[in-house]
Image: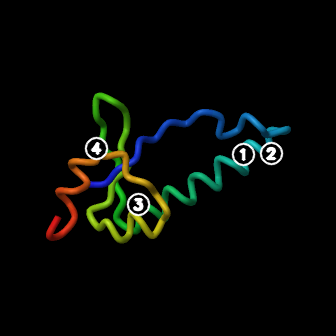
Amino acid sequence: MAYFTWKEQGLTADCASLEAMAARFEEAAALMRRMAAEGFSLERHSDGQHITHPDAGVFEAYGFISEEPPVRQLDLIPGG
């Protein structure tokens, strides 16, 4: 299943105020809630948290790039 690793590194590093930091967190939270409502889920793995979706089309519609190894990605292509 396609996934990407969630690594927060500087979500608010460029914010100049507490209000700006709060707005950034609220934007991120709204996106995460929307993704959850559309079927994305969070899985914990030894290399970090993976955000997955069972439908590759939905995953790609968000513009995410799968971090799966290329061999595994080929296994998911119908007829591949």
**Which of labels 2 and 4 is toward the front?**
4
Q: Nearer the viewer, residue 73 or 17?
A: 73
Residue drawn 57% across the image and 59% down it = 30
Kind of residue at badge 1 = Ala
Q: Secondary structure at mark 4?
A: loop
The residue most toward the front is 80
Residue that mark 3 sits on? 36
Q: Which mark is residue 22?
A: 1
Answer above or below: position of 58 versus 64.
below
Image position, residue 5 (x, y; %): 41, 41
Q: Nearer the viewer, residue 56 or 69?
A: 69
Which part of the image, by quadrant, shows the N terminus?
bottom left
Please report whichever mark, 1 or 3, sits nearer to the chain's N-terminal start. Answer: 1
Question: Label 1 to label 3, Cα distance in Å?
Answer: 21 Å
The residue most toward the left is 79
Q: Are marks 2 and 1 in contact (CB under 8 Å)?
A: yes
Residue drawn 70% across the image and 38% down it = 12
Q: Are marks 1 and 3 in contact (CB under 8 Å)?
A: no
Residue that mark 4 sits on? 69
Residue that mark 2 sits on? 19
Residue drawn 30% across the image and 46% down it = 68
Question: Label 1 to label 4, Cα distance in Å?
Answer: 36 Å
